[in-house]
Image: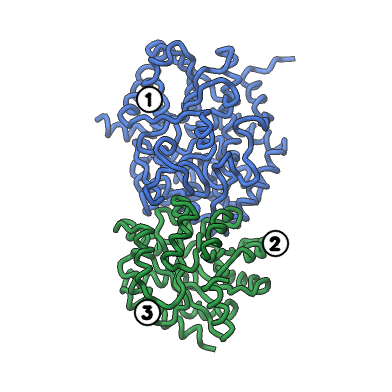
């Protein structure tokens, strides 16, 4: 078992709900934002490596990615900075498959390991296409977090779950990343289906938009991923606002 | 007993045409691959939808009722079969036999209607009530809006902001047909970003919506399914060429953005001796300048930078401003069965005017790419028969050309 899953299982056993903020790598202030998240109760951070065509992302994360790309950010530059972050919690990267395919899965997995990254999320790489990447990631000890979607029939979920390392990413709704007024019913429904078939940690992401919604999903799931709500604060108010927000969500999901 | 007219016989001969497994354009393998190209690289949310579509298409395509319904719609609504026109003036000027497959004469003015009627009938059969589509030049958007009007479905078309500006008339057309048109302001604000936005829509609405993809690209089963809907072009043309020339033409030429009109006409000739030429714009040359990559659900040749970011395509024609190409073209290119040269915008502007003046046919700027290559290469093809797919008419480009030609 890799470091991420190991830590998440231990924390869950100790009764803690897991909080994973997403931060767009290369967006101004992203490194202090990660440190602020770590200092304010994040259990891991998901670092986005910007891609030109992010089909799973809504307007906020698209805008942050595009801005970072316009500043000339590259995967190598982000991974280089990651080695200097000096945070205690495990780090995951989220990116799209072409940035893995281009250097090749073997080289990309090795680059992640060298940068001290624990896990990877590739939202446009479904189970059927994941073979070459998973083999390379497994060989380097990189945990591949698989996404499970509300549209998956019952016979598909166990296969997705089997392949997941680190945790299972339970997609909260039919749609792309972004903030919504209310939590979709599908968010807790899918988390329940997943919890019934796996003892791997199940975290809900996509469409979980604030502390109240984070509280709601963690009544069912083991934890929550917060993306657009975090990135928007980084863009509007900077890294300190990310720390404040993570603290707010932390205290909400810790409440009984 | 009356003898069937030649065009009715041609239409009949295409409806039950089956691919032989030994064909270079046989169906893809189980993973949706043509050689090492294709596949299904989509968010997990869309995997069940792609599987459902694949099953739905297989079932429909095996059903004579569906095939005949589509054939009837294509004949009675879209005006198929499209004719061949031999360009005697330009042909003798160039020293070749130049024959056009007149997809410009289809209803809505391009080949796009073949695929759209097929997908819309399929979507309806599968119980979907809404279509989403991307469009570059607006041809596919107009065709989709037309099919949605005909079959009483809701429709939303995504179009890059840049294209909305240069194809204003088509935007108005789509709205007139009852479709919603959304200008896409992300990324390069052209076709690839419209695809991204249509995919995002589909991720959120997959229960009742069908993504009516406009080219032989995207995740399995799209490249294969869209080719099947367009192979009527090649099957007709093959039969028509046998009548006209007594044999397959020596060269078959089409423009390539995603590559749907090209794969449609290539389908009829891939197993013959005809030389197959897919012409890409110099600013969107996925095959000659790209490397294998993964975007929009498929592994195919793709213009990308040194780390794998997708590059923006730039050409005079919105319909070819696409940095990738359908996986079947990558496959044919990798086998050496088809070649994919490029032409410049200046050559395209020349050939646009040339066909208009010499034959009284205004081609779409996309199709003018194919002619530009023919004009350039004619000295090396003296006396040969050259079949060009005239994929669309140029009315939509007249406004833009007024700006360019003054």
Disc nearer the start of the sequence (3/2): 2
Q: Disc 3 marks which residue?
A: A243
- Nearest the viewer among A206 and A138 is A138
Cα–Cα gap, marks 1 and 3: 59 Å
Task: Specify whether disc 1 shares its chain with disc 2.
Answer: no
Provide the secondary structure element on which disc 1 rests: helix
Q: Residue B283 placed where, x, y %?
A: 35, 37
Q: Identify the disc placed on residue A155.
A: 2
Identify the residue at the far left of this view.
B406
Question: Drawn colour of chain A?
Answer: green
Mark 3, Cα crowd under 10 Å, few <14 / some 14-19 / many 20+, is many
Identify the residue at the far right of this view.
B1
- Nearest the viewer among A171 and A168 is A168
Question: Drawn colour of chain B?
Answer: blue
Q: Residue B404 lies in what quarter of the image?
A: top left
Q: Is residue A194 left or right of residue B141?
A: right
State the residue at coordinates (40%, 17%).
B378
Q: Residue B170 placed where, x, y %?
A: 41, 40
Q: Disc 1 marks which residue?
A: B372
Task: Specify whether disc 1 shares its chain with disc 3.
Answer: no
Q: Quadrant of the C terminus of chain B?
A: top left
Q: Quadrant of the N terminus of chain B?
A: top right
Cα–Cα gap, marks 3 and 2: 40 Å
Question: Looking at the picture, does residue B180 appear above or below residue B326?
Answer: below
């Amino acid at each position: 078992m890799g470091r991420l899953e190991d830590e998440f299982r231990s924390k869950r056993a100790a009764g803690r709900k897991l909080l994973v903020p997403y931060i767009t790598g290369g967006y101004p202030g992203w490194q202090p934002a990660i440190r602020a998240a770590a200092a304010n109760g994040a259990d891991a951070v998901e670092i986005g490596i910007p891609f030109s065509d992010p089909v799973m992302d809504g307007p906020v994360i698209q805008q942050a990615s595009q801005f970072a790309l316009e500043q000339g950010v590259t995967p190598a530059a982000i991974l280089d900075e990651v080695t200097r972050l000096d945070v205690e919690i495990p780090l995951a990267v989220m990116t799209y498959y072409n940035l893995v395919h281009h250097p090749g899965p073997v080289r990309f997995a090795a680059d992640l390991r060298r940068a001290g990254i624990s896990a990877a999320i590739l939202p446009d790489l479904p189970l059927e296409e994941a073979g070459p990447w998973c083999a390379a990631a497994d060989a380097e000890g990189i945990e591949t977090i698989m996404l499970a979607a509300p549209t998956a029939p019952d016979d598909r979920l166990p296969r997705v779950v089997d392949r997941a390392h680190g945790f299972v990413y339970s997609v909260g709704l039919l749609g792309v990343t972004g903030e919504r007024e209310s939590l979709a019913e599908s968010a807790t429904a899918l988390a329940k289906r997943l919890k019934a078939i796996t003892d791997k940690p199940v975290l809900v992401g996509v469409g979980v938009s604030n502390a109240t919604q984070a509280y709601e999903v963690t009544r069912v799931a083991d934890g929550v991923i917060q993306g657009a709500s975090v990135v928007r604060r980084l863009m509007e108010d900077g890294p300190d606002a990310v720390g404040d927000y993570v603290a707010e969500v932390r205290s909400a999901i810790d409440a009984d | 007993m009356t003898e069937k007219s030649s065009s009715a016989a041609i239409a009949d001969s295409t409806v039950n045409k089956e691919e032989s497994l030994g064909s270079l354009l046989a169906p893809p393998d189980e993973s949706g691959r043509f050689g090492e190209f294709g596949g299904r690289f989509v968010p997990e949310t869309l995997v069940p939808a792609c599987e459902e579509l694949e099953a739905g298409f297989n079932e429909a395509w095996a059903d004579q009722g569906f095939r005949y319904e589509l054939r009837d719609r294509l004949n009675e609504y879209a005006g198929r079969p499209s004719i061949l026109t031999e360009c005697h003036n330009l042909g003798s000027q160039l020293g070749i036999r130049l024959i056009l497959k007149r997809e410009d004469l289809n209803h809505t003015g391009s080949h796009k209607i073949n695929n759209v009627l097929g997908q819309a009938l399929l979507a309806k059969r599968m119980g979907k009530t809404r279509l989403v589509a991307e469009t570059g030049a607006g041809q596919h958007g107009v065709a989709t809006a037309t099919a949605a009007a005909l079959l009483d479905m809701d429709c939303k078309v995504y179009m890059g902001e840049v294209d909305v500006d240069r194809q204003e008339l088509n935007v108005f057309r789509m709205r007139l047909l009852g479709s919603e048109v959304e200008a896409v302001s992300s990324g390069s604000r052209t076709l690839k970003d419209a695809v991204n936005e249509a995919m995002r829509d589909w991720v959120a609405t997959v229960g009742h919506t069908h993504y009516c993809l406009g080219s032989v690209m995207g995740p399995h089963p799209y490249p294969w399914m869209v080719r099947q809907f367009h192979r009527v072009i090649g099957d007709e043309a093959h039969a028509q060429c046998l009548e006209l020339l007594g044999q397959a033409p020596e060269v078959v030429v089409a423009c390539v953005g995603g590559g749907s009109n090209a794969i449609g006409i290539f389908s009829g000739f891939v197993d013959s001796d005809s030389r197959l030429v897919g012409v890409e714009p110099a600013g969107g040359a996925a095959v000659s300048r790209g490397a294998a990559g993964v975007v929009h659900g498929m592994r195919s040749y793709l213009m990308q930078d040194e780390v794998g970011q997708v590059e923006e395509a730039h050409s005079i024609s919105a319909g070819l401003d696409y940095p990738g190409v359908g996986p079947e073209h990558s496959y044919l290119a990798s086998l050496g069965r088809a070649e994919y040269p490029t032409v410049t915008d200046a050559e395209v502007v020349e050939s646009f005017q040339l066909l208009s003046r010499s034959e009284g046919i205004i081609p779409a700027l996309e199709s003018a790419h194919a002619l530009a290559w023919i004009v350039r290469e004619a000295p090396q093809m003296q006396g040969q028969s050259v079949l060009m797919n005239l994929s669309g008419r140029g009315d939509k480009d007249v406004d833009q050309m007024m700006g360019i030609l003054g």
